[in-house]
Image: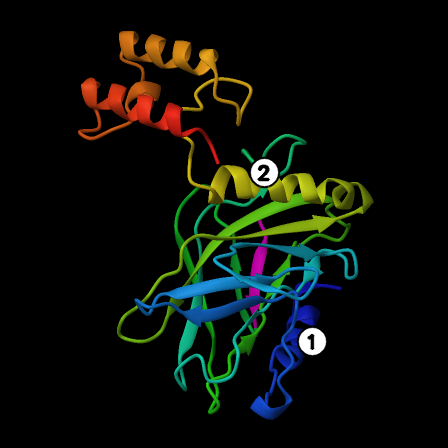
């Protein structure tokens, strides 16, 4: 199925009417709310149905429709967003491909974000790329919208792919979310590695960095990390530049390393 045919399907399927009295949350969608500072916050449902906020990594499974999926979507409980509150999406970085250990490498093919007749490919490098506004809360303050994600190729592109993006509001505050992530999987081998890839994203792109974890094995604080810090400190290496003023390696960096080492990693 080519992109134009998919557009025609999506233009019908992406419109989702809602009534507050009939609201049933879509368990695979990003859930939305505004925090105390009116910033957009996202949450996800656990397998047991518990909604957990400040969750930013979701999945998109392409196995059911070759090279295309329009999940996950974006949704809120009716009444938690102002009527007419609009959202748009921007792509933060080039699409990444899983190599079995990390998402460090850029994927050879871009992913195309689709909404009606707008088609925006992921950039070739890490350039912030505004895509499009894609929906607004209805008269009940309910937002439920999906966009399409597609590879423009005749044959299935199998593997795991990471999209990093952000949402922005269309009101005068122009609020932007923290970075959000979707790991797309296509093919049986990709599904086997999906949990490992999701954990990598959580540990490397979402979790607060562990400043004292400078040497292998990752997640373990030991004498190797002390040796790595001392070596970087003595040679002026950037690994030792842990505290302001950045660009200057001094006693503040030593104090920061010692504090982080004693605190350990989460």
Of the pair 200 and 4, the residue shown nearer to us: 200
Does the magenta-highlighted stretch encompass residue 30?
Answer: no
| Quadrant occupied by the N terminus | bottom right
Q: How many marks?
A: 2
Q: Which residue in the protein does label 2 denote?
A: 200
In the image, 127: left or right of 57? left
Residue 184 pos. (x, y %): 65, 51
Q: Is residue 109 visible?
A: no
First to last magenta residue range: 107-115
Of the pair 238 and 215, the residue shown nearer to us: 215
In the image, 189: left or right of 243? right
- Label 1 to label 2: alpha-carbon separation: 34 Å
Q: Residues within 10 Å of mark 2 (few under 14, many from 20)?
A: some
Disc sitting over residue 148 in the figure: none
Q: Residue at x 55, y 45 (%)?
A: 95
Whichever of labels 1 and 2 marks the residue nearer the N terminus, that label is 1
Disc sitting over residue 9 in the figure: 1
């Amino acid at each position: 199925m080519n992109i134009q045919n998919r557009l025609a399907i999506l233009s019908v399927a992406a419109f989702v009417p809602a009534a507050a009295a009939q609201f049933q949350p879509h368990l695979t969608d990003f859930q939305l709310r505004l925090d105390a500072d009116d910033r957009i916050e996202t949450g996800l449902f656990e397998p047991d149905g518990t909604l957990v906020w400040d969750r930013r990594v979701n999945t998109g499974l392409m196995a059911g429709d070759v090279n295309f999926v329009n999940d996950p979507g974006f949704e809120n409980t009716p009444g938690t967003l102002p009527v007419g509150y609009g959202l748009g999406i921007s792509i933060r970085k080039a699409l990444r491909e899983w190599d079995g250990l990390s998402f460090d490498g850029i994927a050879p093919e871009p992913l195309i974000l689709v909404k009606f007749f707008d088609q925006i490919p992921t950039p070739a490098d890490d350039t912030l790329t505004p895509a499009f506004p894609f929906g607004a809360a209805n008269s009940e303050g309910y937002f439920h919208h999906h966009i399409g994600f597609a590879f423009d190729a005749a044959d299935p592109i199998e593997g795991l792919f990471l999209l990093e993006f952000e949402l922005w509001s269309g009101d005068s505050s122009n609020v932007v979310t923290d970075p959000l992530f979707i790991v797309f999987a296509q093919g049986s081998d990709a599904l086997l590695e999906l949990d490992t890839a999701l954990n990598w994203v959580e540990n490397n792109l979402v979790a607060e960095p562990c400043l004292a974890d400078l040497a292998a094995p990752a997640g373990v604080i030991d004498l190797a990390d002390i040796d790595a810090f001392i070596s970087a400190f003595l040679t002026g290496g950037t690994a030792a530049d842990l505290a302001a003023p950045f660009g200057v390696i001094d006693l503040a960096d030593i104090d920061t390393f010692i504090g982080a080492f004693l605190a350990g990693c989460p």
